Amino acid sequence: MTNGSGVRKLTRNMNKAIFLVISLLITVPLVWTCSGPEQSSHQVKSIQKSQNGNSTEEPTRVILFFGNSLTAGYGVEPEDAFPNLIQKKLDSLELPYKVINAGLSGETTASGVNRIEWVLREPVEIMILELGGNDGLRGIDPGESRKNLQEIIDLARAKYFDIQIIIAGMEAPPNMGQPYVTVFRSMFGELSELNELPLIPFLLEGVGGEPHLNLMDGIHPNKQGHEIVAKNVWEVLEAQLTEGLRD
């Protein structure tokens, strides 16, 4: 279920974006704050309204953003982080979803395995899995990172068998060497195909390497950068919302 055009676009932009990805993620403080045919926002809203009717209100469903400082919104106001922008989009469309931002600065795939069951204490319908960046910084074997990501997916499905999971792809720093960078990048697509999950090819597409879209550290998106990241997420998330409202 990979997005071929997204992957090709990612490759073309790799040289520009790759330096940004993760060089300081492990040092920042704690902050809390599925590929189908694309459907327009008014189509999603229409499905929700047709199911609700005039007398029945749709119960609120949870979208969990599980990631590191990028998800947590390091360096920007909580309301400007991309998960909150997704909440605003949902509210504007009157869709019955509540976003939970479970971003934790410095999170690795291994620590994500240890935290996922605690985060999933309450029912979750959709999870955006944004982890792996800090593994790339530390030079962790991509095979180990992939194993951890698979375990997170398995634990989430064991907890809620019908949970929808979206994988957010990331990049490794070039100083790790081209073989490492290539294997690291490919593991997200491989996990997407193996588990039949939607993929955001590169979360920071259009933001990485653009000084005016990042903080002074050149690493984390600023307010304007988060707006673009939110659009990258929405492009994939919208189809999953449509399917969920049909169930």
Image (cartoon, grey):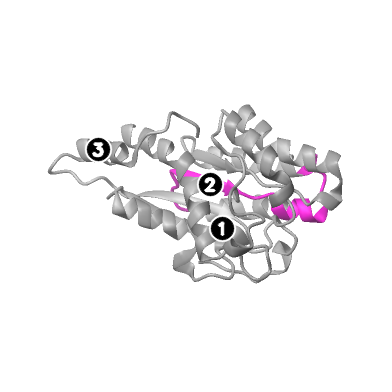
Say what amino acid the circle numbered 3 marks. Answer: Ser
| Residue 123 percent across, percent down from the top left | 43, 48
> In terms of sequence position, does the residue under pointer 1 or pointer 3 come before the other?
3
- Residue position marked by numbered label 1 in the rendering: 71
Looking at the image, which residue is at 46% across and 29% down?
Answer: 36
Give the structural element (helix, strand or loop) at label 3. Answer: helix
Looking at the image, which residue is at 62% across and 37% down?
Answer: 9
| Residue 226 percent across, percent down from the top left | 52, 59
Q: Nearer the viewer, mark 3 or mark 2?
A: 3
Q: Which mark is residue 46?
A: 3
Q: Residues within 10 Å of mark 1 (few under 14, many from 20)?
A: many
Q: Residues within 10 Å of mark 3 (few under 14, many from 20)?
A: some
- Work out whether residue 195 can be spotted: no
For the residues labelled 3 and 2, say whether their Cβ atoms are less than 8 Å apart: no
Left or right of residue 99: residue 156: right
> In terms of sequence position, does the residue under pointer 1 or pointer 2 come before the other?
1
- Work out whether residue 88 can be spotted: yes
Left or right of residue 192: residue 146: right
For the residues labelled 1 and 2, say whether their Cβ atoms are less than 8 Å apart: yes
Q: Which mark is residue 128?
A: 2
Looking at the image, which residue is at 31% across and 38% down?
Answer: 44
The magenta segment is: 121-144
Q: CA distance from mark 3 to mark 2?
A: 24 Å
Looking at the image, which residue is at 56% across and 28% down?
Answer: 1
